[in-house]
């Protein structure tokens, strides 16, 4: 059909007269794409990019959103696919997971120790462990994604065990041996040093297969293993010094119970 031939086409009017079609309509010649992509039932265009070394997906999305606000006309929306979609959807979920993980651990420790101060002493090493793990993410060894997030949540429970070993043993030394808070935590830190180091070593060596993994999905396993290994190593170093210090200032004083079996004999058994 040639648009210029529209003058030669006649249609019947309401008065039964034949009138040219060109007197009823207007036309123009335009070019349309042969294929229109849609996303969530809306016309869309896909923008794909790779992050430069040292930049995360979150940095790329932040730059993209700023550029869209400046250059795109009003009425345009943004949808995400792949890793970007997962990051946007799980970003707030990660913060909630951290919050609820710490709250649940705090409540469980409060019930176990029958105190609100001892759990605070135990959990003081958690932020330091998380910061130690995030150092390697910031220098570019991995990015903050769903796999490293799982590793960080796991790290909260693992690093809390070190504080539990020292605080629980120090409390028993106060009750059974009548030691002061300072003497009890110093002795507990020395006697629990080997179990703490064994726990750290076993966990770090346990994730070595994740660090050296190859094949499909190796990057996700590497990221998770990196967070756990570095967080445990750095967190343990802080735990050995920070937890005893915090215990000396904030721990609850436990009354000595005469007649109880000395803690040295109980631990030797």
Image (cartoon, rainbow, N blue to C red):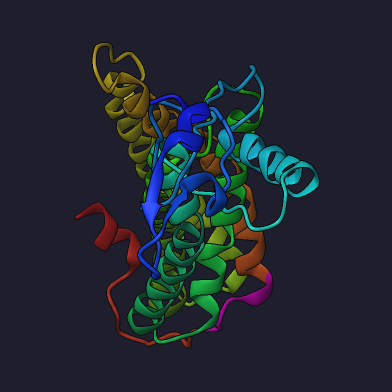
Q: Is residue 115 above or below residue 97?
A: below
Q: Quadrant of the N terminus?
A: top left
- Residue 26: give x, y in percent of width and height: 58, 46
Q: Residue at x 55, y 22 (%)?
A: 141
Q: Is residue 43 above or below residue 172?
A: above
Task: Tell which of 139 and 50 is nearer to you.
Answer: 50
Task: Tell which of 94 and 2 is nearer to you.
Answer: 2
Q: Residue at x 51, y 42 (%)?
A: 236
Q: Residue at x 40, y 87 (%)?
A: 114
- Residue 172 location, quadrant: bottom left
Q: Which residues are magenta?
A: 249-253
Q: Quadrant of the C terminus?
A: bottom left
- Residue 229: give x, y in percent of width and height: 43, 31
Q: Is residue 29 above or below residue 43?
A: above
- Residue 205 location, quadrant: top left
Task: Tell which of 257 and 168 is nearer to you.
Answer: 168
- Residue 77: give x, y in percent of width and height: 57, 53
Task: Tell which of 244 and 4 is nearer to you.
Answer: 4
């Amino acid at each position: 059909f040639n648009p210029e031939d529209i003058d030669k086409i006649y249609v019947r009017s309401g008065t039964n007269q034949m009138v040219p079609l060109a007197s009823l309509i207007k036309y123009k010649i335009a070019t349309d794409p042969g294929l229109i992509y849609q996303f969530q039932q809306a016309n869309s265009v896909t923008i794909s990019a790779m992050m430069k070394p040292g930049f995360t997906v979150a940095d790329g999305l932040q730059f993209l959103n700023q550029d869209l606000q400046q250059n795109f006309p009003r009425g345009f929306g943004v949808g995400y696919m792949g890793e970007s979609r997962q990051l946007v959807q799980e970003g707030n979920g990660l913060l909630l997971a951290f919050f609820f993980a710490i709250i649940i651990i705090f409540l469980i420790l409060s019930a176990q120790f029958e105190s609100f101060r001892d759990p605070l002493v135990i959990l003081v090493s958690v932020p330091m462990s998380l910061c130690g793990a995030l150092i390697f993410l910031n220098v570019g060894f991995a990015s903050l994604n769903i796999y490293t997030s799982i590793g960080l949540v796991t790290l909260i429970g693992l690093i809390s065990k070190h504080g539990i070993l020292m605080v629980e043993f120090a409390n028993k030394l106060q009750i059974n041996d009548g030691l002061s808070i300072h003497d009890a935590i110093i002795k507990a830190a020395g006697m629990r040093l080997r179990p703490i180091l064994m726990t750290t070593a076993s966990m770090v060596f346990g994730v070595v297969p994740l660090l050296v993994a190859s094949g499909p999905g190796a990057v996700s396993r590497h990221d998770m293993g990196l967070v756990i290994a570095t967080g445990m190593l750095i967190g343990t170093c802080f735990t050995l010094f920070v937890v005893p210090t915090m215990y000396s200032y904030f721990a609850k004083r436990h009354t000595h119970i005469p007649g109880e079996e000395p803690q040295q004999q109980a631990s030797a058994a």
